[in-house]
Amino acid sequence: MSSPDRDLVLNYLHELQKRICSEVETLDSKARFSTDAWTRTEGGGGVSRILSDGAVFEKAGVGLSHVIGQGLPPSATASRPELAGRHFEAMGVSLVFHPRNPYVPITHLNVRFFIATQAGEKPVWWFGGGYDLTPAYPYLEDVQHWHRTAKAACDPFGDDIYPEFKSWCDRYFFLKHRLETRGVGGLFFDDLNRWDFLRCLDFWKSVGDSFLPAYLPIVRQRHQQPYGTPQRDFQLYRRGRYVEFNLLYDRGTLLDFSPVVAQNPSSCPCPLWPPGPTTGNLNPVQPKPDSPITTSSPGIGSKNQTTR
């Protein structure tokens, strides 16, 4: 079995961040990413890159982190007590894009690698990550393209991989208190070490490399569609749902590597929580009957809805 190679992982992460930022800047044509290199007192650091007030993207953040520590927080070892007291490294790229046009979906990507070591013991390592799509106004052809691209990234590694990680994504990005999905899904996986290191690395890179081909064609198709105040208001309302998930369920937030969380680029511009009753109707803002959210494919709402 091949041994884990941190340099291979880190080199890919730096290249992926650079490539994504370059292509997004080209598409946006107005705004550029700012760069903020930061360090963590306990060890490690990262590079946060933020694009704001663009022609296509209201806010886009692509963060790279490489965190080093002598011991994991209790929340990280509760389910894996064998990690307690081990030296660890966690590295990854995480992004969230909030488009300006309501017809362009929000998207999120995370690819990460974790390794924990202890003298005299074999290292414990795994990969995690995935991506998901959160449209305010879903279109069937967009969702089909998104999932076809995700499936193509998985297929070389086994026919069962895409169904497994698609299903995991559907379960993970689910707002339990509202009984609704966050969006139309994608891929999600964690604790991936079922193959040797190099094959796991190849799969993980295949997921990362497939993100731009999955997302950018949708942006190009939708970003010039006309919209008005009702569509903008509904977009902001859906952003509120996005924030809810990050605060209540997101694993990165709950792990609380404090400087890493502070540098996370996933914060939403201008989410909207409209006033509503404290009990009963949890969805006071609803799309108009002739809006695309009711005339196109389902994909936001109850768990039994699917577009895949």
Image (cartoon, rainbow, N blue to C red):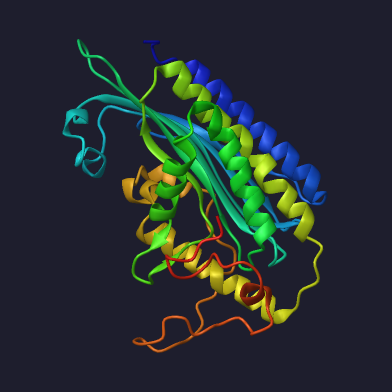
Horizontal side of 217 relative to 81 (left or right) equals: right
Q: Position of residue 212 (x, y in %)?
A: 67, 41
Horizontal side of 8 relative to 193 (left or right) equals: right
Give 186 or 228, whichever is nearer the viewer: 186
Residue pictured at 52% horizontal, 17% vertical: 8
Question: In the rendered image of this protein, does residue 144 appear above or below residue 90?
Answer: below
Residue pictured at 44% horizontal, 54% vertical: 170
Horizontal side of 260 relative to 119 (left or right) equals: right
Q: Position of residue 242 (x, y in %)?
A: 49, 63
Residue with the most extreme front position:
159
Give 146 or 276, whichever is nearer the viewer: 146
Q: Answer whether residue 48 is visible to the viewer in this image.
A: no
Q: Position of residue 84 (x, y in %)?
A: 19, 31
Q: Position of residue 200 (x, y in %)?
A: 45, 24
Name the quadrant of the C terminus. bottom right
Question: In the rendered image of this protein, does residue 9 appear above or below residue 101?
Answer: above
Question: In the rendered image of this protein, does residue 283 appear above or below residue 22?
Answer: below
Residue pictured at 62% horizontal, 32% vertical: 209
Residue pictured at 39% horizontal, 17% vertical: 196
